[in-house]
Image: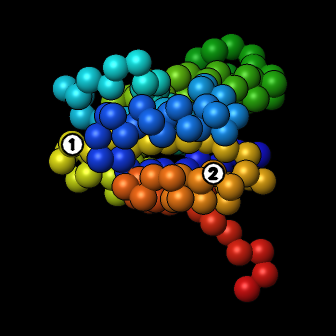
Amino acid sequence: MRRKLYFVLPDVKSAQVVMNELLLARIDDSHIHFHAKPDRNLGNLPKANVLEKSDVMFGVAGGMVCGAIFGILGGLLAYMTPAWFGPVTVAVIPYCMIVGAVACAAWAGVLAAGVPSHKLKPFKKDIENGAVLLIVSVPMYRLTEIRNLLAKTHPEAAYKGIWPTDHVIFP
């Protein structure tokens, strides 16, 4: 299981140095992403994708649940009023539920692609002021190692949190 670490870097030059150090620490470049203002040139740094910049996954999940509920209701309506559709078996209910879940998940995912991610809201002010956000996804057993590495070698990299958040197993 992986966790995402968020760091705010002051400029692109610092981001390039951090990228090289993460690569030397054997973090695959597909797990390192940078996010900045749209007019900011990040050069060859990997940019954050739609899944990281928007609430697509939450939209898809919510759309699937709502679509399944509306599909069940539509299937019940089709079953209870056979005059409109002719004789209908009970099997229409799960079919309507699946079709409703898939259709609403796709629709909600497309809509949510335009909504900024709620996970990036705390960094909005820093990004608008010209900073670069580093999102690095690391295995759980390497969290402390990577966090300490960046804190030691790059004091300008402000650690801003982890997602999913730190959990205390025993209080």
Q: CA distance from mark 2 to mark 1?
A: 24 Å
- Mark 2 vs mark 1: in front: 2
Position of residue 119 relative to residue 159, above or below, is above
The kind of residue tagged 2 is: Ile
The residue positioned 37% from the left and 55% from the top of the image is: 156
The kind of residue tagged 1 is: Gly
Q: Give the labeled residue for mark 2.
A: 146
Number of on-image labels: 2
Q: Is residue 115 left or right of residue 103?
A: left
Residue 60 in sight: no
- Hey, which quadrant is residue 166 in on the image? bottom right
- Hey, which quadrant is residue 12 in on the image? top left
Residue 108 image position (x, y, % from top left): 46, 31
Residue 93 image position (x, y, % from top left): 73, 30
Few, some or many C-alpha atoms within 10 Å of disc 1 (few <14, some 14-19, many ≥20)?
A: some
- Hey, which quadrant is residue 43 in on the image? top left
The residue positioned 53% from the left and 32% from the top of the image is: 20
Name the foreground residue: 93 vs 41: 41
Element marked by disc 1? loop
Q: Is residue 154 left or right of residue 78?
A: left
Q: Give the labeled residue for mark 1.
A: 130
